[in-house]
Amino acid sequence: MPFSLAYAQERTVIKPLINIVKSEKFGLPIDCALGETCHIMNYVDFAPKDGKQTDPACLARTYDGHKGTDFALIDDLAMRQGVNVLASMDGTVTKIRDGEADQWSDDTQLKAIKDARKECGNAILIEHKNNVETIYCHLKKNSIRVKPDQKIKKGDVIAQVGLSGLTEFPHVHFGILKNKKIIDPFTGKENTDTCGIRQQSLWDNTLNINYQPITIHRAGFSTDKPTLKSISQNSSSLKETKPNPNLLTFWSIFLGVREGDKIKLEIRDPNDQILSEYKIIQNKMRARQFYFTGKRLNDKLLQDGVYTGTASIERIDEKGKKITRNIVKTLTVSP
């Protein structure tokens, strides 16, 4: 049946939004360990038609016009193995769409998706009390387990995470609507309201979901020159290699970088000596940023043992507080 992401309009009058009791707050819409096996890739965009990236904290962890919260898997291997999408609240299914392909779309395919208004891909719309609805997009083809008019309970498995529709990575787009207006679950505010001020979190208190200004999404070793595209589409994580590769690299994907962030990647050999290092001070805001460091070996053999790759980011926020994140991966070199 017809389904579209074009489900919200601007309004000029700003009023209090969802006033809900504790028992009615939203559960996590994905069966994963948040911060470990999945991360929030994009938040709701505030002032959605201003041509800027403005997330709930007035930073850039979103893209212009984004209407929900994206819960992204670590890699496409997890998607293929199957990660469940969960109903975030009791309700009734009103619409579904299935049959759209899970694919890494090229420009022609992306245009066709936009022209057909199928940006949401395979999707489910659920109606709740008090004119509240939730939407779940980019679901895996043929994974939807519910039907229109079906009653569901909070936490029920309704589908699996996929790669359908207008997407560049396996994730579920989770959106909340109140009277057809887009609501941000971290602030309880409408997306046309002012960012940076929290009215109330709409997440279940037991979940401890908080806005994260910076996240290191993934990191790993490679014996090829990595690109964001190749890393996104290749789920293999190199943990062991022979001593004779032509190239050794270490890469990382950062979420929510901004001007002034100090970013560092390094590879240390089994003697704890730096084999390769890359440092940069970020010069622009980006929702997703990819960097790598590496060394061409020119037929030299790597020493046997364990190599350590570390990616780190440091920020001084507006209040002068230092925020740091780091991730460490190892690679074993053996004959």
Image: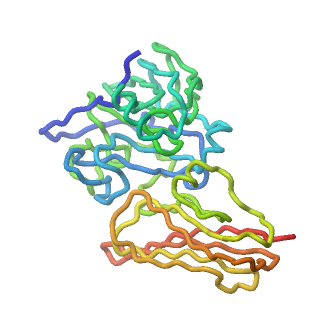
Residue 240: image location, x then y, percent: 77, 64
Can residue 290 be seen from the camera position used here? yes
Q: In which quarter of the image is the N terminus?
A: top left
Please identify the quarter of the rendering in which residue 129 is found.
top left
Please identify the quarter of the rendering in which residue 140 is found.
top right
Please identify the quarter of the rendering in which residue 114 is found.
top left
Residue 220: image location, x then y, percent: 63, 63
Of residues 308 and 209, which is closer to you in this image? Answer: 308
Residue extending farthest front? 299
Of residues 218 and 102, which is closer to you in this image? Answer: 102
Residue extending farthest left? 12
Q: Residue sitting at 19 percent across and 36 percent down?
A: 10
Q: Residue sitting at 46 percent across and 27 percent down?
A: 123
Residue 6: image location, x then y, percent: 29, 30
Residue extending farthest top? 149
Can residue 25 be seen from the camera position used here? no
Figure check: 306 above or below 68? below
Q: Residue sitting at 21 percent across and 43 percent down?
A: 192
Looking at the image, residue 208 sits to the left or right of residue 61; the answer is right
Q: Which scheme is used to colour this image of the protein?
A: rainbow
Figure check: 159 above or below 50? above
Of residues 316 and 239, which is closer to you in this image? Answer: 239
Residue 161: image location, x then y, percent: 56, 36
Figure check: 129 above or below 197? above
| Number of numbered discs on residues | 0
Q: Quadrant of the C terminus?
A: bottom right
Looking at the image, residue 83 sits to the left or right of residue 53; the answer is right
